[in-house]
Amino acid sequence: MTFEKALAAPDRKVQASWEGEPGQRVVTIYSLATGGATELGVKVVPVAELDAFVADLKARGCELADTEFLTTIVWLVNADGVEVYDDSRKQLHALGARATLVDGRVVERSDIASVFSWASDRYTHRGIKAALRSGEEVELVTEISFAATGDPTYNRNDLLFDSGWCTTLGRALATWAGTTYEDKI
């Protein structure tokens, strides 16, 4: 789909960008729905033109979202909270005083003692959890990546590169919860 057609598509639209080649940013238009974040269109924009381009997208109804190149996780931070999507579902809706998890469980913001990012020993499972005041830990956002098992040279440095989104999103969720963030990866 062309970028212009992506902007005209129905459903809620957001745009996110990340660094491309030197001097360029890759801007992606997504449609966000209960069924996940669907990539609609991509455009490479020179850094010098990015601010004007983003302003035009906002004027055309696109909200600003975040993502990183090596993940399917897309998140939207606004004054009321944080919404998180992957390519197949809405994983988290932290709005106002409560967060609704992917399984429908509701966690009160006041019950969250801290937020932290983590990864499994095999590096395939990673994400962000909340430590509740009760001592329980709950997954807020999770990603399974089989790159670690499919590549015998995959190491901790690869994990750190692939999971950088956990730090950015983890900090945003900790800010929403009014608590601390710790990177345990």
Image (cartoon, rainbow, N blue to C red):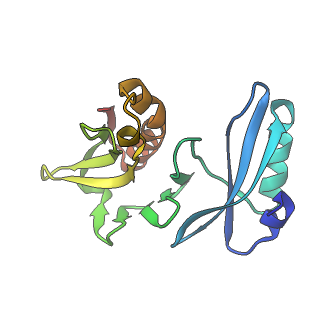
Give the residue displayed 57% in from the left and 41% down from the top. 68
Left or right: residue 62 versus residue 170 is: right
Query: Between residues 80 and 104, which one lies in front from this camera angle?
Result: 104
Q: Quadrant of residue 111?
A: bottom left
Residue 95 appears in view: no
Residue 49: x and y in percent read 87, 36
Q: Position of residue 55 (x, y in %)?
A: 81, 48
Q: Quadrant of the C terminus?
A: top left
The one nearer the camera, 155 or 100, is 155
The residue positioned 79% from the left and 64% from the top of the image is 1
Residue 55 vs residue 101: left or right? right
| Count of picture labels | 0
Residue under the point 74% across and 46% down: 27
Task: Pick whichever, 164 or 181, lies toward us.
Answer: 164
Q: Where's residue 166, x and y in %?
A: 42, 40
Left or right position of 3 against 111: right
Judge whether residue 103 can be spotted in this image.
yes
Residue 46 falls in which quadrant of the image?
A: top right
89 to 86, vertically: above or below: below
Q: Residue at x 36, y 49 (%)?
A: 177
Considering every residue shown, the one lying at the far left of the view is: 135
